[in-house]
Amino acid sequence: MIKYALFARLEAKPGKEEEVAAFLQAGLRMALEETTTPIWFALRLAPGTFGIFDAFHDQQGVQNHLEGPIAQALMAKADELLAKPPSIERVDVLGLKNTGAT
């Protein structure tokens, strides 16, 4: 059962909004390879504000993700693309409905 999640809020530097969007879209390939990350979303919350929501079965999945290639790639580009460090919140999942992705 999915019990744990992370929500990261990303604020793009002015003029870097589309680069952040492209970076997040490319992150899907890496997310598909993470076997302990069953749910992953890249989001645009406002023109320069983005988010990543991912969910996990257990705390080991959370840790694997935080130490994995997406997090490493994000931190490597953070100074170039982001106005401030990402805000990452740990979230408890209280309920979930997933009828399948298309």
Image (cartoon, rainbow, N blue to C red):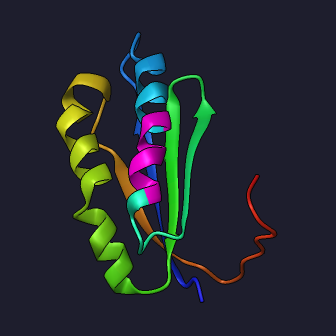
Residue at image point 36% right, 74% down: 62
Residue at image point 51% right, 37% down: 50
Residue 90: image location, x then y, percent: 42, 70
- Give the answer, above or below, for where 91 lies relative to 84: below
- Tally the numbered discs: 0
> Is the stretch drawn in magenta largely helix, strand or loop?
helix
- Give the answer, above or below, for where 12 lies relative to 87: above
Residue 46: image location, x then y, percent: 61, 30
Q: Looking at the picture, tell me which residue is in the foreground, 11 or 97.
A: 97
Residue at image point 41% right, 10% down: 15
> On the rendered structure, is 100 left or right of 59?
right
In the image as oriented, which residue stretches furthest toward the right?
Answer: 99
> On the rendered structure, is 24 left or right of 62?
right
Residue 74: image location, x then y, percent: 28, 42
- Give the answer, above or below, for where 35 lies relative to 9: below
Q: Quadrant of the N terminus?
A: bottom right
In the image as oriented, which residue stretches furthest toward the top?
Answer: 15
Q: Looking at the picture, tell me which residue is in the foreground, 86 or 27.
A: 27
Residue at image point 50% right, 63% down: 54
- Give the answer, above or below, for where 55 lies relative to 23: below
Residue 30: in magenta span: yes
Residue 35: image location, x then y, percent: 41, 71
Residue 94: in magenta span: no
Q: Quadrant of residue 89?
A: bottom left
* Numbered range of the magenta stretch: 25-32
